[in-house]
Structures are given as C-alpha cells and as structure tokens.
Image (cartoon, grey):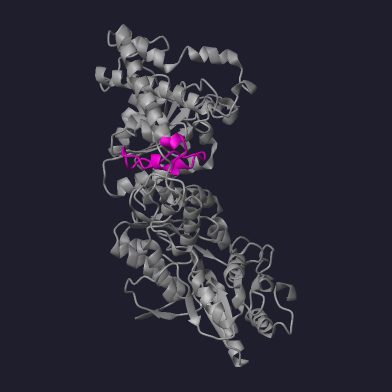
Amino acid sequence: MAEVTLVGAVTLALGRALADDPDVVLLGEDIGVNGGVFRATEGLRDAFGADRVIDTPLAEAAIAGVAVGMAAEGLRPVAEFQFMGFIYPALDQVVSHVSRLRNRTRGRLSCPLVIRAPYGGGIHGPEHHSESMEALFAHIPGIRVVIPSSPARAYGLLLAAIGSPDPVAFFEPKRLYRTVKQEVADDGEELPLDLCFVLREGRDVTLVSWGASIKETLEAAEALDEQGLSAEVIDVATLTPLDMDSILASVEKTGRCVIVHEAPYTGGFGAEIAARLAERGLLSLLSPVERVTGYDVIPPGPRTEHRYAVTADRITAAARRAIAFPDEPAGQAAE
Amino acid sequence: MAGPEIPFTRYIDAEGRAVAALPNSAGTQVLTRLYREMVMARRFDAKMISLQRTGRIPTYPPTLGQEAFHIGLAHAMAEDDALFPTYRDMPSQLARGITLAEALLILGGDERGNDFAGPRADFPQAIPIATQVTHAVGAAYAMKLRGERRAALAIIGDGGTSKGDFYEAMNFAGVWRAPVVFAINNNGWAISMPRDRQSAAGTLAQKSIAAGIPGEQADGNDAVAVYDVIGRALARARDGGGPSVVECLTHRLTDHSTADDASRYRDPGPLSEQWKEEPVQRLRTYLSDEGLWSKEDEEQLIAEIDSRLEETVDGHAASTPPPPEAMFDHLYAEVPADLAGQRRQVMARFAGETGEGDGHG
C-alpha cells in the first residue's frame, strides 16, 4: 500500500476509473501533456491515450457543455476546472442542463458526469484562486456536491462520484493537496456518498465541517481535549443530498454544535445545517448553534489572507463558549 | 469591404421553378414526403396557436415560415444521428419520429413528452439560447471515440450565433474534427432584434472560418436546398470529414412567440414581400407543375392531418397529469433519503389527485 497525498489519491482514483471502465474520459485545460496545473492527471494521458485524457481548448462553458453531450451518449466524463474561481461560465450548463437532463426526459437521458475543481484559500494564490463557493452548487437540485478532506476519502469518494449515475460536483481542498500523506490501497473501493464521516467521537460538543477546514477542526478538537473537553468531529463530505441524521444523532448526544467552513458566513452551507438543527434538533440543543466561517468579504490577497482564514483558535473559542453557555453569551453575536 | 466567399445553394426559387437540376437524393418520394410534412408542420403550428389562445397550452413559439428548414434537415438526418433542437424546432422532432401526442405533452408542459419513443438519442428542446450546441459537440466526440458512423446536428437561431457558446462549440468541433453539423435557422429576427443589428458579419456562415471549419448558406425556404446541403454536411461528418456550419435563410412570418407582438418593432412592408418566398406554396407549385401533386392529393392530405390533430388534442384533453411524486422521482437515479421527506409531504398534500403512473410507484 502506497502513501499518497490528497492530490495523489485523486490521480490514483482517476487512473483506476480509466482502467476499470472504458467509458470514462477526462477532459479539461492542460490535463493531458502537462498533467494538470496541480498534476492531478499526471501520467494518465500516457497511460490511457489523448482520446480519453483530453486536453481541451480554453473555454469553461464548453467543457461543461460537451461533457453533457458525452454523458448523454453513454460516456462517463470527468471534467477538470483549474480553479473554482474559473468555473462560473460553466454554471449555466450545470443549472440549465446537467442537473435536469434526467428529470426533463423522465430518465430517457441522464448526465452521469463529474465536475472536479480545486477550491479554497491558503496557497498564496492570486485573486480568484481562493474562493469557497460550494453553497452555490449545493443550492442546485439534481446534482450531488462532494468534498473530500483526506487522501483516503478523496480516493473512495471520487470513485463513487465517477460511478454514480447522477452528476457530481467534486471540490478538492487544494490547501490539503500535499500537506498530508496517508496509506491508500488502490483497490477500487468506493466510499458511500450521502453519508457523513465521524472522524472523532466526543461527548461535549459536535464540530461539523468539510474540506480544507477539517484540518483546523481536528486541531481544535485536540486542543479542547487537552483542556478536558471532548469534541466529536463530523466531516460532512457530501453536502447534498445531506445526511442530516448523522449530525442530529451527534448533537443529540453532545447538545452543542459548532459548524466550521471557509466559505462566507451569509448563505454558507452552515446556515442550512443550523436551520435544520433548529427545526429538528431544538430540544437536543443546550446552547445556540455556533458558526465559525469566512467573513462576508472578498477573500483578501495572499499578503493578508491569513486574516480571513478559519483557525483552530476560533473554533476552540466557539466550542468553549457553547459549552459555557448560559454562563457566557454564545452564538455568532458573541464573536 | 467585401466579405469572404460563402457558397449559397438554391434549387427551387420563390415561384416554384427549378433553378438548377435537383440533386439525385431528392427523388419523387422524398419530395412528396418533404411536402406532406411541411403541410403538417404548418397545420400543427396553427393548431397549437389556437390551443394557446384558448388557454390550453402555455406560451408557444410559432414555426410559421420555417417549414422547409425544419423538415429538410430532419430528413437529411439518419435515424441514429442525434438532434439537438431548440424550442422552435418541434416540426423537426415530429419529422424525426416523436408522436403528436408526445409533442402536445411537451408543449403542454408535461415532462413525459420528452421520454419519447422515437429517436432515443435526440435531446429535448433547449430553452436557454445556444446551450445545446456544445452538447452536440460532446455527443459527436463520443460517437467518434467509439468509431460509430453517426453524426450530431445542433440547431441554433441567428440570435444564438452571437453567444459565446456558439463560438466555443465551433472551436472545439474544429479542433476535434467532431462529426457535428451546426444548422443555423436565420429567420431574420431574435425577438425584436433584426439580423443586421445582431452581427456586423456579412453572413453568419462565415463565423465558421475563424474556427477552421467549412460554412455555407442554403435557401431556407427551399426544402430541397436544406435537405441537400445539410445532408452533404452530415455525410461528410459521418465519413470523418469533420464539422460544418450551414446557415439557412428563412423568414419568421409571425411573432417570436404567443407572448410577443411583432407590430411593436417590425415594419409590415417587408413582411408581405417575405410571404411571397414562403416555402410551402413554393414546393406545392413545383410539385404541381411536375405533375407530382394534385388538388385531390392536397384535399386528402389536409383532411388526414386535421383528423390526426383533432384526435391528438382530444386525447391530450382526456389524459391525466403525472403523479405528484414524479417531480422527485426523476431528479436522481434513486430518490435520496434527504428528499424522501419532501416527497412524502407532496404525496400527502395531493393525495386526492389522480395521476397516470409512470413506472415509479
């Protein structure tokens, strides 16, 4: 079993899918000869040919549009967008066609494609290279939104996404692309979509996150543990369709919830989870739901992006407030 | 500034006279079939407008005047080619084999119509402008990758050729030498915008030049020209010759849609001139002069079409809507657990309503 990075696990899964299913094709800008700007498709063109690992001309709307036609004709296209910040021309296709081809033909045609894009900040990228706009996609009925947070989950979830009969937006936390190595068996095993992963069990507070900020969330749980407080950590992994039952079960146990995401606060996907906790978990809650998120601003440039970042300290402070409630004020207003 | 040389094809002129020897592919059977379906297209269109005016279907996009384009291209396609139509292309879909009942379901706002039994690889109508052209290129890529002898045909209007999707699609198709044909229905108007304010290009076909693919024009009021030029472009595509653009010059002889009033922006003078070029009369004159069509044939055809249309409208009126849960059942391959609660709520809310089952409980 090889130790791989998160981006290495993506490559491994793409290679496995190409090897196992002749209908799988990859397409995107610079993914062939160059192996992708993050090297996620390194070596795949040589192994599987330029017809299946397709260097496209530079046009994001067309990459999504041709993938729709390919998928309807029975291929399994996996389209790479170099950065989430450049995916917006493709949104028209996602909203208008990808998400609804099955529904509007009553299943005669479908769109089993995967849209891959690195997202999030913290790599000192120029403007437009740091966005976390997953909530835009989570608002679109008919697609699945999946975000891995470790090499093993990147491998298993990406294979599940490619195998899924439904369209999947698969966002990769580029800040974690090369920070961790993990043993990943290239065994073709998919991980379940639509299920949260409990990364750490705890009693006092539930920390809910996904993608890159899982790193800080786990660090916060560790810090809380040193302070004698026990935090449960849930990696949502599939934002939509959401596995709310796992989150509710955890909050029923801990009575407190801190939701962590790098995306802006207002309308972030954390708001959806908080609303559902209010609807279905109110009587389990011992304190207001806390959210630790990015601010409602344009992510600052690399010189000051650390001021925007979600940190373990902010998460720990929110968790401590929740646990101290009602002796101390809690909720976002307390920040 | 002189524009680039763009070939233009016409076989039958506005007076119904052959101005060139008709292509071998357009034999008597083909010609009468084209004519019969053009008459169907026109009467279907009139029937849909009356259904819309009486509140039985929602906003409807008329096809009046574009029958030669729609029927000519549909007959140029092979059964296993794939069509990527827009909202104005129902006559092409009917000629490709979807049923009148399915067409009325689609136009009446019932998704089951798009699960048509006819050409199963054909896409449903695209309602956003120009989004369908990249789909056709992707489908064509899949056909080529698998070594199939098929082609994709995307229809786009003159307004649609202003969008980036069109340029991107042509560009991809050129690089990939994808077996796809872009058929432009240049009917002169994009709602209120006339062709000369849509683009400063002398022809829309010449936009192909920048993508490195051939472009030509056909008289879109001449069914034989459309049938021939699109047919040759499709054959070239299937044979590995790559993509083409075919601009067909038609006239939109009425409003953009039943929600539109063209008198607000359109001078009636040129319109009456354009009526003299309309495609149905033109082909009828040709066929009559050649002794291939009689007054009796015409009467019989119209009686047959009207009876089929009446039957379809009655059948539609008697049909029941899909069941309440249908909007949940086809969104994903299987209903996700997270959607099951909303699905139950809707089923409970509309428990009294009966709907036709569609195989999903």
Query: Residue B119: within the magenta?
Result: yes
Residue drawn where x is 46% and y is 28% of the image: B185
Task: State whether residue B294 appears in this view.
Answer: no
Part of the protein shown in magenta: B105-134
> Residue furthest toward the front?
B352
- Position of A217 relative to B209 (above/below): below
- Residue A132, given in percent of the width and then of the height, sits at 58, 64
Q: Looking at the rendering, which quadrant does residue B258 occupy?
A: top right
Tell me: residue A125, above or below residue A26.
Answer: below
Q: How many marks?
A: 0
Which of the image's four quarters has the N terminus of chain A? bottom left
Q: Relative to B159, is A68 on the left or the right?
A: left
Residue at 43 percent of width and 38 percent of height:
B212
Residue B84 is situated, as x and y percent measured from the top left of the image, at 40, 38
Quadrant holding the C terminus of chain A: bottom right
In the rendered structure, the answer to whether residue A126 lies left or right of residue B89 reads: right
Where A108 sits versus B76, above or below? below
Who is closer to the viewer here, A113 or A224? A224
Residue B152 at x, y = what percent?
Answer: 35, 39
- By secondary structure, the bulk of the magenta-drawn segment is best described as loop
Q: Position of residue B92 (x, y in %)?
A: 38, 30
Is B294 left, or right, of B205 in this rendering? Answer: left
A271 and B217: which is toward the camera:
A271
Residue at image coords 68%, 67%? A295
The reply to whether the magenta stretch includes residue A206 is no
Residue A267 is left or right of residue A161, and the answer is: right
